[in-house]
Amino acid sequence: MKSKILEVGKSQYTLRDQFGLSITKLAKKNKKIIVLDADVAGGTGLHRFRKKFPKRFFQCGIAEQNMISLAGGLASLGFIPIVTTFSVFMLRGLEQARLSIAYNNSNVKLVASHPGLDVGPDGGSAQCLEDLAIFRSLPNFRVISPADPNEMDSAVKEIIKFKGPVYMRTGRSEIKKIFTKKYKFKIGKGKIIKKGEDLSIIACGVMVERALVASKKLEKEGIKARVVNMSSIKPIDKDLIIKCAKETKKFIIAEDHNKFGGLGSAVSEVISEFCPIKVKYISVQDEFGISGEPNELAEKFNLDYKAIIKLAKKLNLKK
């Protein structure tokens, strides 16, 4: 039976390009949408918006703190500011994000490209591995990491509807389409995208497709791994996590982020309180990355599907 939501292996596209296409399309109908850029529109996918709506595109230059403060002020006037830059540069404006946006519960969307080791050749200084932890710690912020272009398109629509601060990852490298256009993203909700009862693999962003590949290969060896797309990291889907914990008893949590403070920590906070089970992590082990192609880095830092398979087997699931 053909899945209504999955189409793994279809044409590739980058999340940053899809974001640029989606927000430009929405802006045609919603004139409150404006974009603030830190001189990197070509790298964040917003060059399309700049060309289509030059009067609603604000070039702030390499002054991220000022850009984020400006966004807070514009939000107070009724606009919906979209603040865009690379993830590591967004961190420069942390104090302003805290006081001008989070503290005031301002309707600002911080949308960051170039997260994680998936940044690739730009190297360790540009591979942001801390962003989910940082923005998850700020009150009022929603934190999101879509898994493919179709989910990104749906997520863009949702964050514009939502009134309040949002931090959302996009991505630099090409990514395979996982979902059909019918797939719907909801803030605060995860989704089981492949069934299985031996363990659950909970993933976000680029790790979702790798989790699906691992699950299919494990199935051939008699291990049925459930795959959960947890693109909403804050708020997180507590009910779904508890359900999967009770049904599969074991978790592998996969993310392109440092092991501290990201998806793994968010999931573990839920299960430690409500349903303690055995958990293993696929993540960057508290270190900086290096320059290389995304797939090469995934293999070197044990973030590829092979690492997920290896860890699943270590859980001694096959009986």
Image: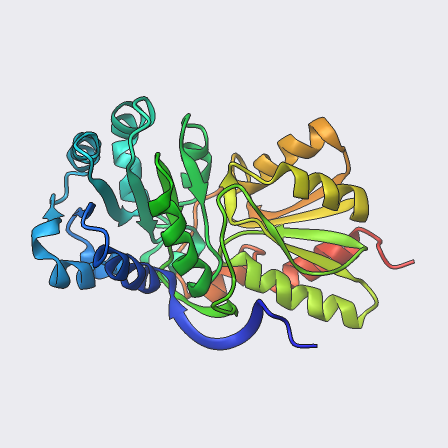
**Residue at image point 44% right, 54% down:** 117
Q: Nearer the viewer, residue 243 or 307?
A: 243
Residue 112 pos. (x, y %): 32, 48
Q: Nearer the viewer, residue 199 or 290?
A: 199
Q: Residue at 70% across / 26% down in the picture?
A: 273
Camera-side residue of 180 and 14: 180
At horizontal 72% and vertical 39% (from top left) the residue drawn is 242
From the viewer's perspective, is residue 14 above or below residue 239?
below
Q: Give how far across and how far down residue 186 sits, in percent.
A: 50, 48
Residue found at the very far right of the displayed protein: 319
Residue in the picture at 60% in, 70% down: 4
Quarter of the image for the N terminus: give it. Answer: bottom right
Is residue 286 at all visible to an observer of this figure?
Answer: no
Tell me where residue 121 sits by quadrant: bottom left
Left or right of 58 in this view: 318: right
In the image, taking residue 71 as reference, residue 260 lies left or right, namely right
Query: Where does residue 265 sit, x and y in percent of width and height?
Result: 58, 35
Q: Is residue 193 visible?
A: yes
Going by the picture, which residue comes out furthest to the left? 55
Q: Could you tell me residue 51's position as x and y percent?
A: 12, 63
How many labels, in total? Answer: 0
